[in-house]
Amino acid sequence: MSRTAVLVSCAELPSGDGDDDAVVPALSSLGFSVSWAPWDSAFDFASADAVILRATWDYPSRRAEFLAWCESVPSLLNSAAVVRWNTDKSYLVELLDAGVAVVPTSLVPPDSKAAFPSSDFVVKPSVGAGSRGAARFAAGADASSHVASLHAEGHTALIQPYQSSVDTSGELALVYLGGIYSHAFTKGAMLGSTMDSSGLYLAEELAPASPPADAVALAEDVLDAASALLGILRAELLYARVDLVRGGDGKPLLLELELTEPSLGFRQADASAPTRFASAVRQQLA
Ligand SMILES: Nc1ncnc2c1ncn2[C@@H]1O[C@H](COP(=O)(O)OP(=O)(O)O)[C@@H](O)[C@H]1O
Ligand SMILES: [Mg+2]
């Protein structure tokens, strides 16, 4: 049985950044004919059996157009409804309200005034990726002009206390495939690092990790709560990446839940991870 799978990218990086290279032969081995295509290209996405978002990193400045395209693709993974919810970091407040341990987050929509934490803090756009528009401020600094510039671009600003554990331990990213834990990796501090040559994301320092039990327990809670809010089963998520940091008390906190286009760290994972991914794609189509 031959089926087609398209890995969806953006015009600047039409075959992604290399992280998904091993996914192509894994999907081929499981009977897929695989190609890459930028989401805004003329590719016939409607005829593909599986349309898999992987490297659509240019959507934040064109979110409405991107979501309209997502809705137009019948076999999109993850689904358009998931992508709509997940491309606005306001979902962090929904997860917080659902009782999940999230980095304290306040939303400042256009026309409202920001209050800044008394510790070091971060201001970032609620719609963003690759650290663009994210900036760190010292305690007591006036970040109003950064908030105003995000507002001028139509963004809601998101304000969080700076989690200094990022500087020492980085972020821990836990990857789930078909709702089941697959592998994990760490990511160094981003704010202060340099932009990749494509200008789409900050170059990241990644390393394989074996996650401690408290981190896995939180990631599991995050997936359960997100699925409940979305009204879906966890198994309906082809992929999910849960990015955790540690708070001042050492306990894990959710920084970001990536259900749209996360790098899944296949270059940091065990050799079977691409096969698990391909198997999870088969499960979505079954
Ligand atoms: N509250 C925070 N404390 C410490 N670092 C942060 C915080 N928020 C963001 N960062 C840094 O900025 C990067 C980008 O922020 P993130 O929320 O992950 O958005 P995205 O990855 O979608 O651009 C993170 O990987 C982290 O290094
Ligand atoms: Mg992130």
Image (spheres, grey):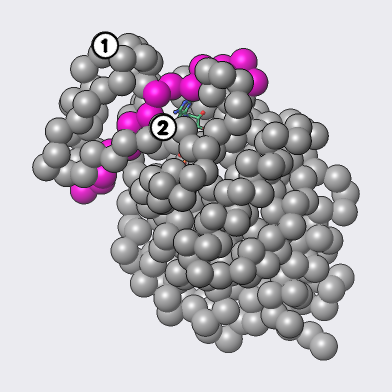
Residue 211 percent across, percent down from the top left: 75, 35
In the picture shown, does residue 9 fall above or below 133?
below
Q: Is residue 21 left or right of residue 37?
A: right
**Disc number placed over residue 104 in the picture, else none:** 2
Say which of marks 1 and 2 sits in front. 2
Mark 1 lies on residue: 140
Picture residue at 88% right of the left edge, 49% below the top: 271
* Image quadrant occupied by the C terminus: bottom right
- What residue do we see at 82% from left, 88% from top? 1
Up the image or down, 261 lies above or below 252; here it is below
Q: CA separation, marks 1 and 2?
A: 17 Å
Q: Nearer the viewer, residue 250 or 236?
A: 250
Magenta residues, start to end: 154-169
* Residue 256, horizontal then vertical, whole percent: 51, 42
Q: Specify the amino acid type for callout 2.
A: Pro
Q: Residue 183 lies in what quarter of the image?
A: top right
